[in-house]
Amino acid sequence: MTITVAPVPCLQDNYIWLLRGARGEVALCDPGEAGPAIAAVEEAGGRLDLILLTHHHGDHVAGVAAVKQRFPDARVVGNGADAHRLPPLDLAVSPGDTVGFGGSAAAVIACPGHTRGGISYHFAAGALVLCGDTLFSLGCGRLIEGTAEEMFRSLRALAALPPETLVCCGHEYTESNARFALTVEPDNPALRARAEEARAQRAAGRPTVPTTIAQELATNPFLRAPDVASFARLRAAKDNFR
């Protein structure tokens, strides 16, 4: 069964992700704002089956209550270990579990680093991963709660997914991430091409995501870091980059 995915812009630079199954199923990932999320579901036919949550931050969950009120049959899915700071869950999952959708299933992947309880959802059938604020186009999330070692392991887990996997991340950060990445690898031709592509996409009002695992392996300095120490130095440099 094929699953399709599309970004729904919200807030200043967030993305909600709208998934559709082959039999009309619809899911949302990380509805940080209710209005755009509800409008996207209505445009998709007015049916909502799942609300998938990657982590507890408000810009990813603030719209859940209103979306759930509008579509009460939708099941809210999130990490059971973080249930105390997520909206009420209808399905509490743990890394290693699967979540059924669209005649297929998503594997739940542990992704601590940005938050302790961060998770990603990998749909092999749709060749996509919903990774919240763990992996970005040309970047990765800040270490707000976790350690460099935890984030390095999380990124390695995502990097091991099939190269064609679509990376559906939580923010439109590609242009700013490209500026930093080019200070790390200024002579990387794939990175320079990606930076130019991102500028053109944003100038035309288009999203720069989803990207792919293959593209990130070729261009993302955080995925290309060979070890935890190198990753930690990059993350600290990015935190102070202006």
Image (cartoon, rainbow, N blue to C red):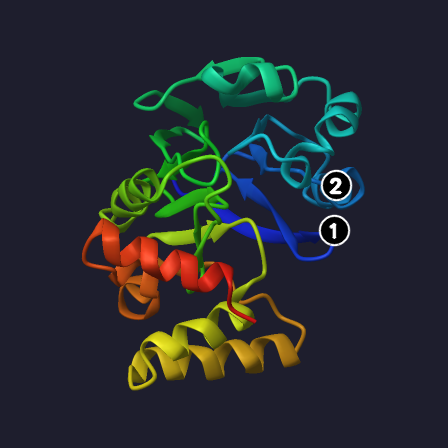
User: Badge 2, how many Cα within 10 Å: few under 14, some, many 20+?
Assistant: many
Residue at image position (50%, 59%) is 239
Task: Pick the residue in front: 143 or 29.
Answer: 143
The Cα–Cα distance between marks 2 and 1, rounded to whole angstroms, is 7 Å
| Circle 2: element type | loop
Answer left or right for 30 relative to 39: left
The N terminus - image quarter: top left
Labels 2 and 1 touching (C-beta < 8 A): yes
Asked where in the image residue 95 lies, by quadrant, the reply is top left
Residue at image position (49%, 14%) is 92
174 w.r.t. 239: above or below: below
Answer left or right for 8 relative to 228: right
Decide which of tag 2 and tag 1 comes sooner along the chain. 1
Asked where in the image residue 182 lies, by quadrant, the reply is bottom left
The C terminus - image quarter: bottom right
The residue that label 1 is drawn on is: 11
Residue at image position (33%, 70%) is 219
**Residue 164 seen in render:** no
> What type is the residue that disc 1 sits on?
Leu
Task: Pick the residue in front: 39 or 24.
Answer: 39
> What type is the residue that disc 2 sits on?
Glu
x and y percent of residue 229 in the render? 24, 53
**Residue 46 seen in render:** yes
The residue that label 2 is drawn on is: 33
Residue at image position (42%, 36%) is 146
